[in-house]
Amino acid sequence: MADTFKVLYQGQPGTTAAQVYSPGSLKSAVIKHMGFVNTTGTDRTLTIYVNGSAGTNLWKPAMTIVADGSGEWDGTLALGATDAIQMKASAATAITVTIEGDEIS
């Protein structure tokens, strides 16, 4: 078993919920930090789901990230090999997301 602490995802979610990270086959992950940066001059929202994008998969409802502002989440979110994080933003290329944690293989 090997632990790899690293940036698991960095990018800008689009306006439709889509997968941004999954540990993959024979791996698991512990998410410890997520950072959110609004790169625009307008308030934007970010919605986070786990294991699908239905209402029952909602993990963080539409969070407002103020214009040219940022936010973060610190905690523990465990993901198995088939688990996944999906995200959507109110505007494409508006919010940069960085997910950091421990990937275990």
Image: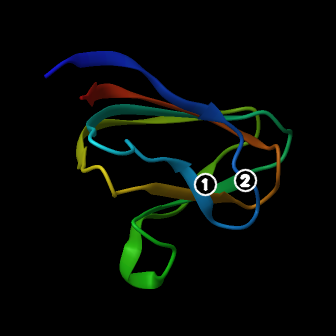
Please give the name of the residue rendered at 75% of the width and 50% of the height, measured from the top-left corner.
43
Q: Is residue 24 above or below residue 58?
A: above
Residue 42 horizontal/vertical position (percent): 83, 47
Q: Residue at label 1?
A: 64
User: Who's the residue at 69% across and 49% down the image?
Assistant: 13
Q: Is residue 63 above or below residue 54?
A: above
Residue on which the image places disc 2? 44
* Image disc number at residue 91: none
Residue 34 lies in what quarter of the image? Answer: top left
Question: Do the residues bearing badges 1 and 2 touch, measured as CB atoms within 8 Å?
Answer: yes
Q: Amino acid at mark 2?
A: Arg
Q: Tell me which residue sits at (56%, 56%) in the image.
A: 19
Judging depth in this view, the residue of 49 and 84 nearest the camera is 84
- Describe residue 30's horizontal placement relative to residue 72 as left or right: left
Locate residue 87, reporting x and y percent. Answer: 58, 57
Say which element carries label 2: strand
Whole-angstrom CA distance, mark 1 to mark 2, is 6 Å
Say whether residue 95 is left or right of residue 94.
left
In the image, 17: left or right of 4? right
